Amino acid sequence: MITLTEENYIKAIYHLSNNGTENVNTNAIAEAMSTKASSATDMIKKLSEKNYADYKKYQGVTLTEKGKRVAVNIIRKHRLWEVFLVEKLNFTWDEVHEVAEHLEHIKSDKLIDELDAFLEHPTHDPHGDPIPDKDGNFQHIDKIVLAKANIGVAYKCVGVDDTSTAFLQYLDSNGIALGTMITVMHKEPYDNSVKIQLKDSEIVVSQSVAKNLYLKKI
Amino acid sequence: MITLTEENYIKAIYHLSNNGTENVNTNAIAEAMSTKASSATDMIKKLSEKNYADYKKYQGVTLTEKGKRVAVNIIRKHRLWEVFLVEKLNFTWDEVHEVAEHLEHIKSDKLIDELDAFLEHPTHDPHGDPIPDKDGNFQHIDKIVLAKANIGVAYKCVGVDDTSTAFLQYLDSNGIALGTMITVMHKEPYDNSVKIQLKDSEIVVSQSVAKNLYLKKI
DNA sequence: AATAATTTTTAGACTTATCTAAATTTGTTT
DNA sequence: AAACAAATTTAGATAAGTCTAAAAATTATT
């Protein structure tokens, strides 16, 4: 049996490793899990013993195929629950994350398959992140970050990197949501802020905003 | 903070105490929790320290008002999720219990209030058990057990005591569901079995079935 | 290449919920 | 009311996940 804590570590490693592709170091895991490096080391050893991860002392970890399958399955559940919360239970996109963190650990294949069907097989969650299918395959969007968008080109907002309440509420209050049309008017080299044109307004966003907003050419 | 284990003990005590009205002894709790009496003693002490229960050594436990509130809230969540699973996700009434055991521990007032609204404030779960409202008030049905029903009177099936898969599947295969009309034809004194008339059939059920099926006069 | 700084691991301790085995209390019988 | 049986509690251990403090390995700097 896999424990809740093991699942959370696996998920953290998956995200830190850029979807299972890179090596992750102990401190990064400890930080992501809000714990100490010594605790992370203990858990890494355990995950390695259980074949969820490959680990050599002082060399960091990578997830095994088995570990990646666990991670992707949790992500699938997390994102499906997020869609449910927003579409059926009137949650806003900044409210869903915390509850989905708990719902994602409920273990029932029937539950998640039926939820998927009930929601009509959504492909993206409320933050624009792709939802893996039953076999773990993602539908990839080729998105770029606002900071790297070209001036004068029309884009559509397709996702966020930061899903914190503060950031999502900032976007809401500035009239930016998934699907919002955005044209880049000017990039200020001094502080890397970006002036963008929305439907009815023109606003300037800071570099940290520009780095966390994903766009797609239309 | 209340732990998952504490919640499960409180729920078990609530059910064993006949909705918080009676004193419960240690062995009964241990048995209900599939654990040993010594473990139950430890937890009872802890619940008592945290003011969820009143406890005197060797005298059994009762839930405090605070403990009862916790129990009723978990029952509310459990039953609402059961309705969701049956009505929206195509679960059958014998499949819901196990998943609901996990869903009931998710802590979010908004989640449960919105779920309640989404389901249009159901008053009973798929087994006929009443769903407490937000304030913990039940809508009581005055039901009787089949074993005590009167001969020749028409009843409607309104619930079950035993929610095991075996029992529910037995009912399904004999054409008995919530709402099914039942008339008692004969009670056999020898083994306490009961002959009942359904819409298109007449069947004999054993005493153990007759003790677990709730009816209401129509 | 030697030393300093950083990262990672080890060692030992703590907490929660569990167990077994022994001790204690309550109840039941004769 | 003494003795036995049953129920309950205590004592001491264990496993999971965490911590602090110290040791070891790696990486960076001079």
Image (cartoon, coloured by chain):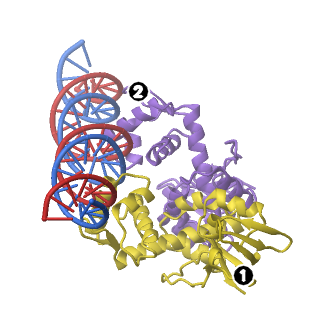
Chain colours: A purple, B yellow, C blue, D red
Q: Quadrant of the C terminus of chain A?
A: bottom right
User: Residue B116 has which mark?
Assistant: none
Q: Position of residue A24 (x, y in %)?
A: 45, 35
Q: Nearer the viewer, residue A147 or A55?
A: A55
Kind of residue sitting beneath label 1: Ile
Q: Position of residue B153 (x, y in %)?
A: 74, 85
Quadrant position of residue B51: bottom left
CA gap, disc 2 and disc 1: 78 Å
Kind of residue sitting beneath label 2: Gln
Quadrant position of residue B190: bottom right
Q: Nearer the viewer, residue A176 or A125?
A: A125
Report which residue position mark 1 lands on: B151
Q: Chain of mark 1?
A: B
Which element is circle 2 on?
loop
Q: Nearer the viewer, residue D11 or A76?
A: D11
Q: Specify the farthest residue to the right.
A: B200
At 39% across and 38% down in the image, what residue appears?
A43
**Left or right, residue C28 beside residue A87:** left
Which element is circle 1 on?
loop
At 57% across and 56% down in the image, what residue appears?
A187
User: Residue A59 has which mark?
Assistant: 2
Q: Position of residue C18 (x, y in %)?
A: 36, 49
At 68% across and 53% down in the image, what residue appears?
A110
Q: Chain of mark 2?
A: A
Q: Nearer the viewer, residue B183 or B96?
A: B183
Rate crowding at label 2 as few (under 14), some (14 to 19) or many (20 or more) other CA atoms within 10 Å: few
Quadrant position of residue B114: bottom right
Q: Nearer the viewer, mark 2 or mark 1?
A: 1
